[in-house]
Amino acid sequence: MQSQPDACRREGEIGLARRHDSLIPFSRDHHQSLVRAVRMINAHSAAADRIAALQGFVYEWDRRMRQHFIDEERLLIPLMLAEERSRLVGDHDALRSMVEQARTIVEAGAEDGGLCGEAGTRLEAHVRWEERVLFPTIEQRATPEELASLAYETARIDADPPRA
């Protein structure tokens, strides 16, 4: 890896944020999660729209988000301070609970009770915190060796067909 900080950076997947190569697979997933979050937040007019948005949330969870959370916890927690770990795990646990509630609602065809908007808002806030606060902090605090190790692991994740 080159010694200049910008030599190992390139344009990230979210907006114009520059992101270390090791975090780009997570940012790519985050873009998809933001799309899903906005759909849930905006699905407020009809119950059928909310159920469809929750169905999409469950689908994305099963398709990629569950593994994304596992990968983040496995790879990023060692690079985080206690407060950051607490926030990450707390957000992940809340979203895990919400997706299971969404699964129950979708299977029953029941009223969502506001879950659709709440889950969308929580998911959006979580992704934005990771992209705007956590990732830049990790990029600044991690050693070049830690970032190289993370890059190796995330390259393996990025090559995994279910994420494609």
Image: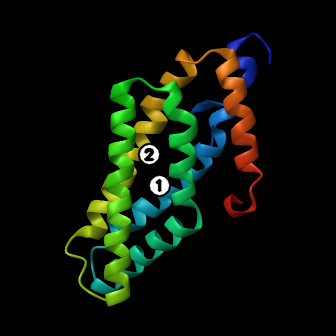
Q: What's under tag 1, amino acid-wise?
A: Leu
Q: Position of residue 155 (x, y in %)?
A: 75, 41
Residue shown at 42% from the left, 42% from the top: 128
Residue 81 picture quarter: top left
Q: Which mark is residue 127?
A: 2
Identify the residue position indicated by label 1 in the image. 34
Specify whether residue 12 is in view.
yes
Element at badge 2? helix
Which is more toward the observer, 26 or 15?
A: 26
Could you classify mark 2 by the number of other residues whose Cα lies within 10 Å: few (under 14), some (14-19), or many (20 or more)? many
Which quadrant, please, contains the N terminus? top right
Characterize the local packing of mark 1: few (<14), some (14-19) or many (20 or more) Cα atoms within 10 angstroms: many
Q: Position of residue 6 (x, y in %)?
A: 70, 18
Residue 15 can be seen in this image: no
Q: Is 148 on the left or on the right of 91, as rendered?
A: right
Q: Residue at x 44, y 69 (%)?
A: 57
**Above-or-below relation of 87 to 9:** below
